[in-house]
Image: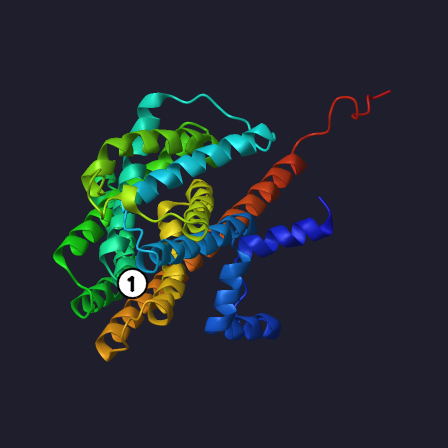
Amino acid sequence: MDKNTMAAFRKLEDGPASPRSSGFLGDEDSAGKGALSKMKRNLAAADWKVFSFMMVNFFSSAGIVITNKLLMERFHFNFATTLTFIHFVCTFVLLLTVSAFGLYQMKELPLGPTSKLAATSMGFVLLTNLSLQYNSVGFYQIMKVMTTPMIVLIEAVLYKKFLERKLRFALLPICLGVILTASTDFRLNLTGTIFAISSVVVTSFYQIWSGALQKGLDADALQLQTYNAPLSALFIMPLLPVFDNYMVKDPNAIWSFPFNPLNSSLIFLTGLIAFLVNVSIFLVIGKSSALTYNILGHGKTCVIILSDFILFGRPLDVKGISGVALALGGVFWYTHLKLEKARLEKEAKVQESELSDLDSEKFDMGKPESNDEVRRPR
């Protein structure tokens, strides 16, 4: 072993130097106490491949909420279930197109687990669109924030997976902010609230199961979505006349909707964006976790709620804005704690690997020389 390796080994055995023993380390530790320095270290520990998937999901998810609401509010296409069906069909067709160009390899998967996931996927998208149809954009989006506490609750009760105390505390302002926002919403109604709460529960199960199934079946996002999209479309077909108006002689039925190139193009655009959303959900959850996906979702909340004020006439009131601010404050606190935890775990793994390598080298030093190198007495 050379001198540099021995020095590194002694340094690791002695533990980290104190600020007094080295002015340079002391200054660095002092600077690291700042929030900005800690944030930079947390971001440096992030996986940038996952980050790129998160950005695709961020822009596509914000885009589909705005385009769906425009389609419902401005073009009066109030057929959320049919729109959900169109989204699943578009996703499946585009996946087949992508596969035809050789961008991914289809894989045979068992129908049992994939059907279970498809059922929750159908419920997740359907209830989300119904919540969007019957609620304001602000209430719709702020209710989705409750998915994170719901996932924590489900994982604790059903899977005995518990969250650290400081992370649980970070969820309190999120819940309080949602309650305050809901109590002051200008379009609050019972039907919309039921759809919103149901959406939170189904979405939580969908996100937990999608991550577990992707890892359990050793399938990538596109392979799993190739089964999920057509099965979800199949499951939703019997519900089309239940939630949407399909009466033949009714002037408000879908058959009487005045389709034209503009609104038809917008419907197709929502299908294209839905494809990006559906695929990116699996990419993000498969490479990280359901909680990470929800942290990303809270960033989208800022953009979507802003669109409610700009595009859909949400009134400016102190209580409503305070509720949104409180919920988002909890989101950013929770995000910071999760990033900090990820950074510390990554640093601990690196240090453990270094110690293991040095222990191995130290063990090799104590070995006797091989027989070939030992001099025989003359």
Q: Quadrant of the C terminus?
A: top right
Name the one closer to the observer, 332 or 369.
Answer: 332
Extreme-bottom residue of the structure:
318
How crowded pointer 1 is (Cα within 10 Å; few <14, some 14-19, many 20+) is rated as many
Name above or below for residue 231 compared with residue 9: above
Residue appearing at x 34%, y 71% in the figure: 309
Residue appearing at x 19%, y 55% in the figure: 192
- The spot of residue 37 in percent (x, y) is 52, 70
Quadrant in the rendering for residue 330? bottom left
| Residue at numbered disc 1 | 170
Quadrant in the rendering for residue 70? bottom left
Q: Residue 220, can we see it?
A: no
Q: Quadrant of the N terminus?
A: top right
Name the one closer to the observer, 95 or 147.
Answer: 95
Extreme-left residue of the structure:
190
**SS for dot 1:** helix
Amino acid type, callout 1: Ala
Name above or below for residue 377 compared with residue 178: above
Name above or below for residue 196 compared with residue 373: below
- The spot of residue 233 in percent (x, y) is 34, 33
- The spot of residue 82 in percent (x, y) is 31, 41
- The spot of residue 324 in percent (x, y) is 29, 69
Residue appearing at x 59%, y 56% in the figure: 11
Name above or below for residue 51 compared with residue 281: below
